[in-house]
Structures are given as C-alpha cells and as structure tokens.
Amino acid sequence: MKDIPFHSIAVIGAGTMGSAIAGQIANAGLSVLLLDMPDDDGDEVNSRAIDAVERLKKSDPPALFSKACAERIQVGNIRDDMGKLAKADWIIEAVVERLDIKKALYQQLAAVIPADAVVTSNTSTIPIRVLVEDMPTDFRRRFAITHYFNPVRYMRLLELVEGEETDAAIMARLKDMNDRVLGKGVVQCRDTPGFLGNRVGVFALQVGLAEAAAHNLAIDHADAVMGRPMGIPKTGIFGLYDLIGVDLMADVVATLATILPPDDAFHVVGESKNPVAPLIKSMLADAWAGLVFAQKPSRAARRAI
C-alpha cells in the first residue's frame, strides 16, 4: 500500500483503547507495533501487550475483521523496545489519562523517534497546549490529538485536534489517513477541554447519574428511561459507563474537574458533588473497572444508589 500517508505505525498503551486502535490499523491491512509496560513478575515480559491481542481475538462484537488480522500486530514493551520506534513515522499514545505519565512518555519519545515522525494522543479531555507545554517547538509542530471512540471498529467518529503550532501538512496527512485508510468520519475540533464529544457527553452522563440518584431510580430503570427514549445509546447511562470502563470514566471526570474553569456547570455534577461518586469509588476500590453494573451478584447493590 504505497499511497497511504503512514507506513510504520506504533501504538503505546495496550489497554482497551490502545489495543483496539492497533486492531483497526491491522484491519486496514497494515502492520502495527503495540507496546505497553514490561511485566517483570511473570514468565513473559510482554504479557500485557500479548494479552491485549488475545482479548481482541475473543472480543464480542469482534474488534478484528478476522483473527488473522492479529498477525499484523507486533508486541513489545516500552523498556526494551523503544528503539524500534526509530523507524516509525506515526506514534499513537494511548496510555492512562494522567498528565504526568503522558508527559514523561513524550520525553522518552523525543529521544528516540525520527525528526519527522508524527505523534498523536488518544486523550479524550486534555488540551494539546497542556500536553506538550514542556516539549520543544519541533515536537509540538508534529503533535496532534486523534481521539477515537470505543468500540473503535464500530464507532465512526474521530476527533482530530490541532495545536497552535501543529503543521497544517501533518493535519492533512492525519485526516487523509483516518478517513481514507481507517474508515473514520473525521471531525476537526478546537483545542479545548473535552473537545466536542466528551465536553457534551461526559457532562450528560454525570447529569444522568445525579438524576438517577435524586429520583431514587434503580439502575435498570434509569437505563431504560435514559436510553433510546432520550436519544441515548441503548446501553443507557450506567451501561455506557460500563462500556467505556468505570476506571477510565473516573479519570476523565477527574481530569475535566481539574482543567475546566471554576464556574463551569460541570462541577455541579462532577466527581466531588455527584451523589453516585461514593458508589463509583467503592467499585474502583474493589477493582471493578468495567461491566460492574451488569454483574448478576451485585443486583442488590445496583439498587442501592
């Protein structure tokens, strides 16, 4: 495939989003390198990335066109395999939604990637100006945000965000790559907290949680009402929290609370003031990260909001 904008692609972060992005690149017939933290406690140092690929192959609905697509995903870790990025022309960062971790990774990348390599972040909330404020001008020129939505194979939307210094030619390459090669509907967004989808969507989810608690609704009932009847996905509010991942949602909500102005309406239903926040925290403390509201053993707890 000679007429594509990028040929040597790497994804850093083998969680739900990172692995699914790598899967979609593989679906397009391209090879991709998937890196995560090394696992020094087990027999396989690359187990995190390996397990992520196995999850892709078993996912329902299928994240891959066929299991054979997984053969295009190479795996590694960010301690032993960063040198492999020396030939990469597009690196996608999909690590946890923590600014300190992202910034540390960018410093590592700057030391090994080619001078013309493009770096994008899959962040759903953090503006570019904050992400790369400590990076040199040359790095900022070739940095953008490519925010994919979960599940990556089926959600057509891609938020493409440019910074004040992002090169226009790079933005054109990213738009072409994601539209023509990866099959995304590209929406270019301003560099503001939450961009477009999460600025509206996360606020709506938080309002839904608060309203369910205020009216003492069982979670099943809340999802029945705050679902298709209101133009919301059939998962409903709590079901969508499950699909996204309660741990990821907690990070996103906390990030928005940090970077939005103090007088923003989001704070009224954000983490600190939302009546469902204690339930979310207790779930995270018990390591319930996704599909927690759908677990049959917790049916009584599901009604105790």
Image (tube, rainbow, N blue to C red):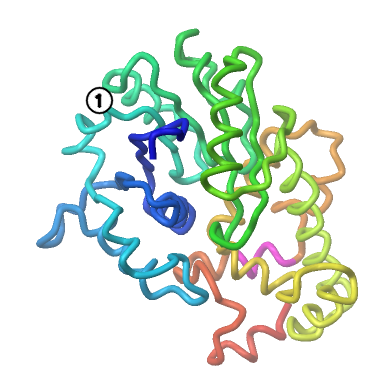
* Residue 123 placement, left or right of 93: right
10 Å crowding of disc 1: few (<14), some (14-19), many (20+): some
Q: Position of residue 100 (x, y in %)?
A: 45, 32
Closer to the camera, 217 or 172?
A: 172
* The furthest residue to the left: 43
Q: Position of residue 121 (x, y in %)?
A: 51, 35
Q: Residue at x 75, y 51 (%)?
A: 270
Closer to the camera, 103 or 174?
A: 174
Q: Please state which amino acid type lies under the numbered disc 1.
A: Ala
Q: Residue at x 60, y 12 (%)?
A: 165
Q: Which residue is mark 1?
A: 86
Residue 77: quarter of image: top left
Asked whether residue 52 appears in the rendered view, the answer is no
Q: Read off the magenta span.
A: 276-280
* Residue 51 placement, left or right of 201: left
Q: Position of residue 94 (x, y in %)?
A: 46, 44
Q: SS class of the residue under badge 1?
A: helix
Quadrant where the C terminus is found in the figure: bottom right
Closer to the camera, 134 or 110?
A: 110
Placement of 76 over or under 222, stated as above or below:
above
Asked whether residue 22 appears in the rendered view, the answer is yes
Q: Mainly helix, strand or loop, the magenta region?
A: helix
